[in-house]
Image: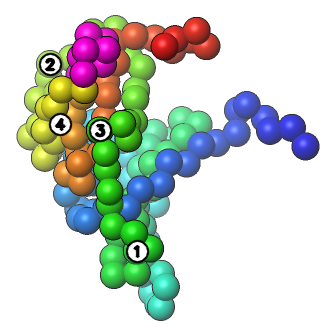
């Protein structure tokens, strides 16, 4: 079987506080709530799926007492969005107002965009570059 390169992609992460993380990605970044679920029994967890309705990816956030592991972000755990143009200062301000913290991601990413840590500490890079297979 060959995987279709247009296959949908889900990025899944644990969260300490779904409400705070939802504010960051919805109010700050502009994603939509695609699905929300509440743990209903043993072994289940609260679930929040965020994205843009027509995008080929979405971000799944899970929380609650039944997480297999707590959030453990590190500086190399990045979600990069290629904007193909300047990063809007108003967007960065909205992300900060929604609970984000602007951080340095080192010379490369600092040159090519803006990095903001979400309420769980995971890093969102808004790159002013466009994506190509030769991008580094």
Query: What numbered label is drawn on residue 95?
Result: 4
13 left or right, relative to 124: right
Please name the residue that numbered disc 3 is placed on. Answer: 75
Look at mark 2 in the image and give the residue it sits on.
Answer: 89
Provide the secondary structure element on which disc 1 rests: loop
Of badges 4 and 3, the one in the foreground is 3
Q: Is residue 61 above or below residue 85?
A: below
Mark 4 surroundings within 10 Å by alpha-carbon count, few (fewer than 14), some (14 through 19), many (20 or more): many
Q: Is residue 52 above or below residue 135?
A: below
Residue at 54% over, 35% down: 55
Q: Is residue 9 visible?
A: yes
Name the residue located 45 percent from the left edge and 39 percent from the top edge.
52
* Residue at 39% from the left image edge and 69% from the top image edge: 69
Q: Position of residue 71 (x, y in %)?
A: 32, 60
Q: Nearer the viewer, residue 79 or 91?
A: 79
> Which range of residues does the magenta coloring cover?
106-114
Q: Kindly identify which numbered label has been placed on residue 67.
A: 1
Instruction: Give the mark nearer the N terminus: 1 vs 2.
Output: 1
State which quadrant residue 105 falls in: top left
Q: Nearer the viewer, mark 3 or mark 1?
A: 3
Dot 3 lies on which element? loop
- Closer-to-camera residue (15/98): 15
Q: Are marks 3 and 1 in contact (CB under 8 Å)?
A: no
The reply to whether the magenta stretch includes residue 133 is no
């Amino acid at each position: 079987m060959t995987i279709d390169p247009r296959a949908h992609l889900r990025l899944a992460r644990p969260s300490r506080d779904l409400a705070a993380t939802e504010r960051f990605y919805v109010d700050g970044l502009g994603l939509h709530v695609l699905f929300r679920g509440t743990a209903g029994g043993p072994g289940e967890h609260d679930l929040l799926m965020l994205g843009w309705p027509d995008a080929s990816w979405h971000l799944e956030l899970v929380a609650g007492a039944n997480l297999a592991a707590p959030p453990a972000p590190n500086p190399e755990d990045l979600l990069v969005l290629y904007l193909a143009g300047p990063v809007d200062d108003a967007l960065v301000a909205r992300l900060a107002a929604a609970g984000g913290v602007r951080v340095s991601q080192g010379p490369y990413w600092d040159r090519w965009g803006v990095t903001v840590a979400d309420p769980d500490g995971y890093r969102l890079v808004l790159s002013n570059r466009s994506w190509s297979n030769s991008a580094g």
